Image: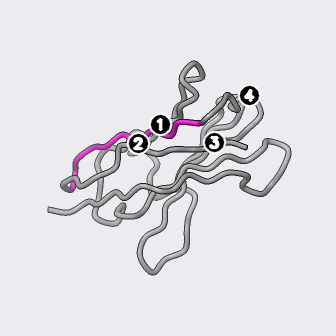
Amino acid sequence: QVQLVESGGGLVQPGGSLRLSCAASRSIFSTYVMAWHRQAPGKQRELVARITSDGITDYADSVKGRFAISRDNAKNTVYLQMIGLKPEDTAVYYCAARHKLLTRIDYWGQGIQVTVSS
């Protein structure tokens, strides 16, 4: 079993920045794809960014050029650096882990609120 714990959310003004962190309870990055998803009120959960076990990253079109996913293997932590935040980025952000050979999400974090508002 793996626990994922997110931190770093909060309220930020449009154009501002935040960095989310996701700490895993044990070392899994060599075999898991790590991802950030988000869910806005009344909308479906969507994939925002992911990083493979080989360090390959990809992003939703809506956040390309503004968000960056990275990881620190020594700290078992994945990050989501967000700049140029927009009100439409307001959502609960979830960290997720999926085994690289499977298609289902194995572990979810509890979610953390990000609110972009003036």
Q: Residue at x 31, y 43 (%)?
A: 18
Give residue 94's mark.
none
- Disc 4 residue crowd, few under 14, some 14–19, many 20+, Cα 10 Å: few
Counting residues from the start of the chain, the first of labels 3 and 1 encountered is 3
Q: Which residue is mark 2?
A: 20
- Position in image of residue 15 (x %, y %): 22, 50
Query: Within the image, what quadrant is residue 92 found in?
Result: bottom left
Query: Within the image, what quadrant is residue 99 found in?
Result: top right
Q: Which residue is mark 4?
A: 30
Disc 4, SS: loop
Q: Residue at x 49, y 77 (%)?
A: 43
Task: State the CA–CA distance, disc 2 to disc 1.
Answer: 5 Å
Q: Give the magenta range.
A: 14-24
Task: State the CA–CA distance, disc 2 to disc 3.
Answer: 13 Å
In this image, 2 relative to 48: left or right?
right
In this image, 112 relative to 31: left or right?
left
Are the residues at dot 2 and dot 3 in contact (C-beta closer than 8 Å)? no
Give residue 34's mark.
3
Residue furthest to the right in view is 101
